Image (cartoon, rainbow, N blue to C red):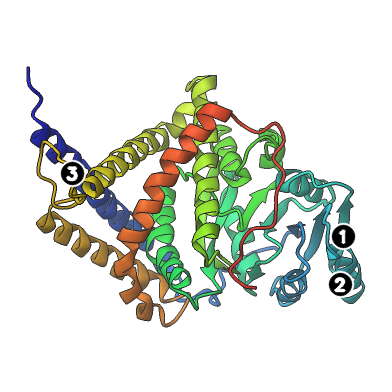
Amino acid sequence: MELDWQTIVWKMQSFVWLYPFIMSWFWITGGILYWVLREGKFRRPSDLPEMNEFPRAAVIVPCFNEKENIADTIGALSQLAYPDFEVIAVNDGSSDNTAELLELLQQQYGFLRVVNLEHNQGKAMAMRAGVAATDAEYVICIDGDALLEAHALHWMVYSLTLRPNIGGVTGNPRIRNRKTLLGRLQVGEFSSIIGLIKRTQSVYGRVFTVSGVVCGFRKRALHEVGYWGIDMLTDDIDITWRLQEGGWRVRYEPNAMCWILMPETLRGLWTQRLRWAQGGAEVITKRIGEGVRGRSLRMLPIVIEYFISVAWAHVTAIVMLLWVMSLLPFVSLPFDLHGPIPSHWGLILAGTFFIQSLKSMTLEQRYERGLFRYLGWLIWYPTAYWMIAAITSVAGLYRTLIFGRQRHATWVSPDRGIK
């Protein structure tokens, strides 16, 4: 029986188009529900919700080679509008003068305590050390280059104390560096994609991952699930799954803003997204290997969506490769392929993505004014980021399957886009 290659390719193109189309409307609907149920009751982040008491909170700042950023990070923490908090900076065996800078900052700020680890043991171990050093029940973790907004701690603690079953809260990262095309694309990405996804997942009950750059936890929840795994590439994905499998809820708090640095080079972006993809694959394969049962069934919708997204990444990569081959004059293919997806479908998808971006940026305008000027840059998003997402998803999965998880995940200084 002769294969009908034209039909096979058409079905592959349909899947490449249909999956992001359906997910876009899924996220739009989830964003609207989140607004109606939770977000619409507050006008702006400075309209703080009332709290009967202000339990002590600790901000954990794991540091590795942060000499360029740590003073700004600690300085921003000095502006926090919360009555009872401490900051614990954990120097994870930095090879620069981060330790000396932290000692000077400790003399300047009475709320700061410094923990020095002799060797680089990884972010997970640094956060474990920070949590062990405090008696606060609520801990907020930020990166050593992040600038926490003044009211963010209030919002994080408020969210953690709303219900006794809330074990984790993920905040709202905002991009600081936005001078290059990649920087502006990421402003649009965080404003129109990531925030909307987290709203949707929070409403429907399961979050794939907290934002590791700004997240908060109930200390008792961390203790019950065994804290962060030291053998996982992405500690934020790992702890999110541990909490939810342990019966704890994870909540998104968009009012808890944190200004972050992101890669502005293709190499830095590739490294970051490959790490994210590999980290997600590590968590999924570990759970599948242990067997999805009992409380793990809570995460089944996220597992199913993950495998559909990986299948989409494979099909997209194949279709893109076939399309490039069809452009070569010396290659003859047994089917016609004039683009990754048919042109009229592309227009529908572009229109859907525009509606999604418009809706998400409308929600985000309350947190950051002037976002709509980045809407024009988002026309490049499907071309640039979908290709990167497809390739890194495939590469991250196979790197995990072939090489397995690391025995002990340490860290290196990332590309932060500012030289």
Quarter assignment of residue 56 = bottom right
* Residue at image point 50% right, 51% down: 273
* Residue named by callout 1: 114
Sequence-wise first label, 2 or 3: 3
* Residue at image point 50% right, 19% down: 291
Which of the image's four quarters has the C terminus? bottom right
Which of the image's four quarters has the N terminus? top left
Q: Secondary structure at mark 3?
A: helix
Q: Nearer the viewer, residue 237 or 376?
A: 376
Name the spot of residue 335 as percent of width and height, x first: 10, 39
Callout 1 environment at 10 Å: few (<14), some (14 to 19), or many (20+)? some
Query: Residue at the front extreme?
Result: 330
* Residue named by callout 2: 105
Quarter assignment of residue 290 = top right
Classify residue 95 as left or right of residue 124: right
- Comparing labels 3 and 1, the label whose residue is closer to the camera: 3
CB contact under 8 Å: marks 2 and 1: yes
User: Mark 2 to mark 1: distance in Å?
Assistant: 9 Å
Name the spot of residue 79 as percent of width and height, x first: 72, 77
